[in-house]
Every structure is written in structure tokens, then in C-alpha cells.
Amino acid sequence: MVDKQAHPLLRDRAVGLSAELVRQLDEAVDAVDRRQPEQAEALLAELLAREPACAEARRLLGVVQQLRGEHALAVANLRQAVAQNPDDALAQMNLGIALQSVGEPEAALAALRRTCGLAPDFAPGWFNYGQMLLALGRPVGAITALHRVLDHDPDHPAARLVLAEAQAGLGAAAQAAANYREVLQRRPASAEAWTGLCNLAGERFGADDVARLRQVLQTALPTPAVRTALGFVLARALEDQAEFHEAFRVLRKANAQVRRQVQWNASAEHARAEAILAAFASPLDGAREASADGQVVFVVGLPCSGAALVAHSLAAHPQAGGDDRPDLQQVIQAESLRRGPVGARRAGTQTPEDWARLGRDYLARSDSRRGGKPWLVDACLPNWLLLGAAMTMLPQARVVNVRRDALETCFDCYSQLFASGNEFSYALDDLAGYWHDYDRLLRHWQALYPGRVLELTGESLLAEPEDQLRRVLAFCGLDDDPACAARLRAERGARADVARGALYGSELDRLRKLLDAA
């Protein structure tokens, strides 16, 4: 095994420099370690003024700029460092990380692949390469790369966690569970491992897991966020033991902890939905010609509705690509900054040429997501709020709305600690309000754009998964392809068949009343 700290790549980085410049370079490294990037950048700029050809100082400057969020500058300096020393695997790795930050994933992947070729025993290179492959939707390659990490560094918890995520995405639940539990053997308080197990299709917690979680929660934990995450997992583990009253008590406490931290103005969000409904009360005079740049299908719905499963299954089609980047939101925000809010008072003043321009802007932004394929699957679920603008700017666009039972959807959201976004999900009142806005707008879009919005129920997807998938493919104009059904089978969770609302009984009476309110 190669010790990460002793790897030759990390030693003797200042060969050829004078003693004074070596000291200055060491000071810059120490400043980075002390989380003082401004001081490190000043030291490196001074060193480069005296020794412009120092590739190591150039590399470190790029690393510091990356840490400060100055990604374009980081790329420029790291490219220069690589040009000065093309065989420096560490510089290649740093460049790959920076290129991903500026939205050049394929170039990033090439740099990381080069890293692994130059230093095949360097675990961090394989780790970053594996992460990148997974981010680009290539889990098989990611698994191979991450196994290489563990060959060189078996106690690499981050690699084991990413490996488990990739395995889970391919439906290899048993292997994923084994890797999550391997992390927990070494790090019992790993919120990432516990959460990964919690999200794993078919995995059930036992009484011993409940005991371990309670024990961990009694210890000093690194951050309040870790304690909150473990609270959500404990609630799930208690549910698996049929302790529904205690599970709901723990879940309510965990949600309250998150709600105090997030920013969510339910009144403002409702007012926004009402304004959009008024702005698009009837079809607007939009772009007149379909773009030749490809077809778009927006998959929308609430989290935990099955919408993400449908989107991933569609995106597995050989003629389609896509992800959940918020390109549509960014186009609308950019236009609003230029000319005033698009989605409210000014929508009716947009000309057909304006809408066509916005459609071209959206397609240009999303071009990298389709990977050269004719169909784009936009899986940004909150786009349901902006479908009026989307349908007006993209006359060829279609929408698949995945709707599941309101109580089951909302309670599943309430039971989930999201990595980001979905701030509405941590209070029952907020959840019910969000559901009502979604429900009203989707019914409006379906009436406003007949033939362009397909509604699919989560229940039908569970009962007849492949039949419903073929229905969606036909609606989109895509041929049936086995890759789509394979992705559907791999990702479908066994727990989705459970009607959890009935299990919790009266604990959910308040949520039922909020959802029943008109």
C-alpha cells in the first residue's frame, strides 16, 4: 500500500529553487493549511514575480484560487503549470478539479484520466477520476476507478462512500450496503454512511442499528448538522421496528432543527405562484417555430413522487441525455435582471422574438447536458413553476408530470433530509402549502397546453412500471429501448410500495387536514 502522505508526488516539489524561495513556498503551503488563502496567494504572487518559471508555485497559486472560488483564474494558472510540466500528475489532477468547476466536464475527465496514467499508484488521482465519472453518469467506470483507490488505500472512507453510491445507482444494493457498513465499522458516527443506508432500496434497519444510533447520538458529534442527519436516520430505523409513535417524535424534532436553519417564506412563495398563474392565465404569443437544435421534455413533480425515477429512465435512452441542472430558472432569472420579472407582470409584453431568443438561450445553456443527442430530459423537478414560460419559448417542448398521493408524497418529503434545496419540506404547513400551489398550477398547465402535458401517477408506475414507461416514451416520440427499462428496474425502491400514511395513523392527522383544506 502506498501511504498518501509519503507518495513521491507529494515530496520534493521545490527541486531547483534557492533556499530562500523554498522557504517562501513552504510558508505559502503553511498558509493554505491554516486556511489563510489570501496570505498564501500574496506569497505565491511574490515568488512568481521573482521566479516566473516556477511550475510548482504556479500550480499552488491555481489551487489557492480554486479554494477561493476564483475558478477561471485557477484554470488559467493550472493550465500554465501543466504546460510547463506536462508529466506532473498532481498538476493534472488539480487542473481536472478546476475544469469541472468552470463547466468543462469532458476536459476535466481527460485531465484526471491523464493523472491516473501518469501515477497509477496515486489514490487521490483515482478518487477524483471516479467522482468525475459518477458525476457524468458513468457509474461502471466510476466503480472501477474507486476500486483502484481502495487497492492503494483501503481506509479511504470517501472513496468507499462514493463507491457505494455508484453501486446503489446500478441496483447493486447488497454491495452498496456492505460498503456503507464497512465505513460505519471504522467511523460509527458517519452521517454520510448512515444516510446512504437509509436511502438504499430494500435496506431495513435492525434493533441493533437503533441501539448503535442512540449510542452515537449520546456522544459529542462534530457539528449540529451531523446530529440532525442522524436524527432522520434514527426515525427511519425506529419505523423499521414498527415504533411509529417514537419515530414520528424523533422525526418532528429533526425537522424542527432544520427548519430553524433554512430560509423559506411560504407567503412569498404562494404569492409568486399566484402571480405566475395570473401572468399565464391564457396562452401567450410565443416563439413560432420549433428549434432545430433538438427536442426537450421537462419531467416535473415533487420530490419522492417518482419523477426523478422517470427522468433517469428517460435519460438512459440512447437518443437522450440530461440532468437536473436549473438551466430554465437561470434563463428566466437572467431575463428578469435585464428587463424585469418575466413570470409575473411583464410576461404579456414579451414578443414572439423575445420568447424565441429565450428558447435559444436555454438550448445553448443545456447543450452540454444532451451530450450530442437529439433529446434533452430536463429533470429539474421545481420547473413546474415555470412551465408557462418554458412552453411559450419552446413550442416543441413536452412535459411529463409525475403525481403521487398527496399524503404519501408529503410525508416522504418530511421524512427526508435533502442535501440541498426543498426548504419547504421541513414543516407540515409549508409542505401542504407547496403541494396546493403545485397541484393548482399543474392542473392549469394541463388545461392550457392540451396534448403537451402528460400526467403519470406514481401508483401506476409502481403497479405497471414498464407499461407506464412505454407510455411516456411514446408520448415523447421516443422508441422503446431496453436501456430505459433496465434503469427503471435498477433504481426502483422496494420501500416505495409501502403506504406509510396508514402505518402512522393519527400521527398524520394534522397533515391530512392541511392537505384536505381547499
Image (cartoon, rainbow, N blue to C red):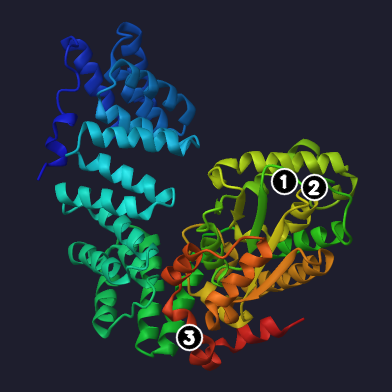
Give the alpha-carbon distance from disc 2 to disc 3, as whole Å: 41 Å
In the rendered image, residue 211, in percent from the top left (x then y), is placed at 25, 80
Amino acid under disc 1: Ile
Amino acid under disc 2: Val
Name the image quarter holding the C terminus. Answer: bottom right
Q: Is residue 9 left or right of residue 58?
A: left
In terms of image quadrants, where is residue 89?
top left
Residue pictured at 77% horizontal, 55% vertical: 391
**Mark 1 = which residue?**
332
**Mark 3 = which residue?**
498
Name the image quarter holding the N terminus. Answer: top left
Furthest residue in direction top, as rendered: 50
Residue pictured at 53% horizontal, 44% vertical: 371
Residue 342 - label: 2
Of 217 and 495, the residue lying toward us? 495
In the rendered image, residue 74, in percent from the top left (x then y), is placed at 42, 27
Q: How many marks?
A: 3
